[in-house]
Image: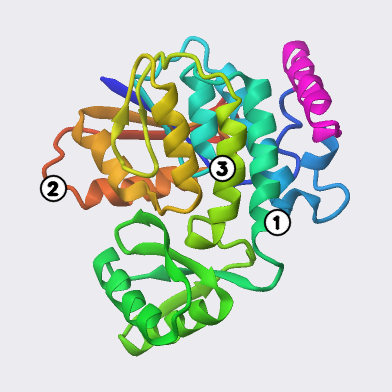
């Protein structure tokens, strides 16, 4: 049996998600994180003051810390043969693979969130979930919108067959929504997110991240990681330059989650565990599995929230 650990990204935050980590060593890690971030991360994770947990510069370190603490409770479980994470979750995966220290990862994602928020003025960006059509059809329609409007709109996340997220300039995304509806797409859900992640609008944020990543030390990967940008395996072993390049490119490139999950399943992984808050990635992964008729044998899926609730 081969095992993959999956790490969630933004959108999986749950108020109070750090509260269950009450062991002395876990409280020490939370205290360390608060010192690194110069903020009371435990209070912020409870969404106090109201709304702060949805501010991306705090969402990202809170989810990463929750994921790493959940990882720490997996002692005695089969260790992963490969790790991967969705967007922000890629940093959690790098911690799990021993390439990044927790302190460095917390600072990186905190700054990443700030860079993303600063890159696009509030109210000028938009994201929307598109349910039903396959990725090539969405790309085709959006290409027409870009040609007709000159605006920026593209697929930001390819989450699973029949589920994409599009993002970009507000007017261009709204035009994309209308064009997709005209093409017969019935379900499109605008998201309550103003930062158009993983699009060309994140170019300035990507440059800022490059400066930060160039100053960050990366250790060799203890296990391979599947990169968001390519959906391909990286490592194990020394891969610092490649990791830095992929994390910079990730800022303005789509999250190729369908391709990433297909690569893992095709490599013979049969046990997949989502490590962190929620179970979004398990649901997406099961849909990818159903789209791959060549996959035979039993695939098991689990998440740490469910595992702990049964103990």
Establish if 31 lies above or below 137.
above
Residue underneath mark 2: 293
Residue 147 visible in image: yes
Spatial CA distance of label 3 from label 1 is 28 Å
- The stretch in magenta equals 22-41
- Residue 262 is left or right of residue 217, and the answer is left
Label the magenta part by its dominant secondary structure. helix
Specify which label sits upstream in the sequence, 3 or 1: 1
Relative to the observer, which residue lies in front, 164 or 132? 164
- Residue 39 is left or right of residue 146, and the answer is right
- Residue 280 is left or right of residue 205, and the answer is left
Residue underneath mark 3: 278
Spatial CA distance of label 3 from label 2 is 27 Å
Establish if 193 lies above or below 7.
below
Residue underneath mark 1: 118
Q: Position of residue 176 (x, y in %)?
A: 43, 80
């Amino acid at each position: 049996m081969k095992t993959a650990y999956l790490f969630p990204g933004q959108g999986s935050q749950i108020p109070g998600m750090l509260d269950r980590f009450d062991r002395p060593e876990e409280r020490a890690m939370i205290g360390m994180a608060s010192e690194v971030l110069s903020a009371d991360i435990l209070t912020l994770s409870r969404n106090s003051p109201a709304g702060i947990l949805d501010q991306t510069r705090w969402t990202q370190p809170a989810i990463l810390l929750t994921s790493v603490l959940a990882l720490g409770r997996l002692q005695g479980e089969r260790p992963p043969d490969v790790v991967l994470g969705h967007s922000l979750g890629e940093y959690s995966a790098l911690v799990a693979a021993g390439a990044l220290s927790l302190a460095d990862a917390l600072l990186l994602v905190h700054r990443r969130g700030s860079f993303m928020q600063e890159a696009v003025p509030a109210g000028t960006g938009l994201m929307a979930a598109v349910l039903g059509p396959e990725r090539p059809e969405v790309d085709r329609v959006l290409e027409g919108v870009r040609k007709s409007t000159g605006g920026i709109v593209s697929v930001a996340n390819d989450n699973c067959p029949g589920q994409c997220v599009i993002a970009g300039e507000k007017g261009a995304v709204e035009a994309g929504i209308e064009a997709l509806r005209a093409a017969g797409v019935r379900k499109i859900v605008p998201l309550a997110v103003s930062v158009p992640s993983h699009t060309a609008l994140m170019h300035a944020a990507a440059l800022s991240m490059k400066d930060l990543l160039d100053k960050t030390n990366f250790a060799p990967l203890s296990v391979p990681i599947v990169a968001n940008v390519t959906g391909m395996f990286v490592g194990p072993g020394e891969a610092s330059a490649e990791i830095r390049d992929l994390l910079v490119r990730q800022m303005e490139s789509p999250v190729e989650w369908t391709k990433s999950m297909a690569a893992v399943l095709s490599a013979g992984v049969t046990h997949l565990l989502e490590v962190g808050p929620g179970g979004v990635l398990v649901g997406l992964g099961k849909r990818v599995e159903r789209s791959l008729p060549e996959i035979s044998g039993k695939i098991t899926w689990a998440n740490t929230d469910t595992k702990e609730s049964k103990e």
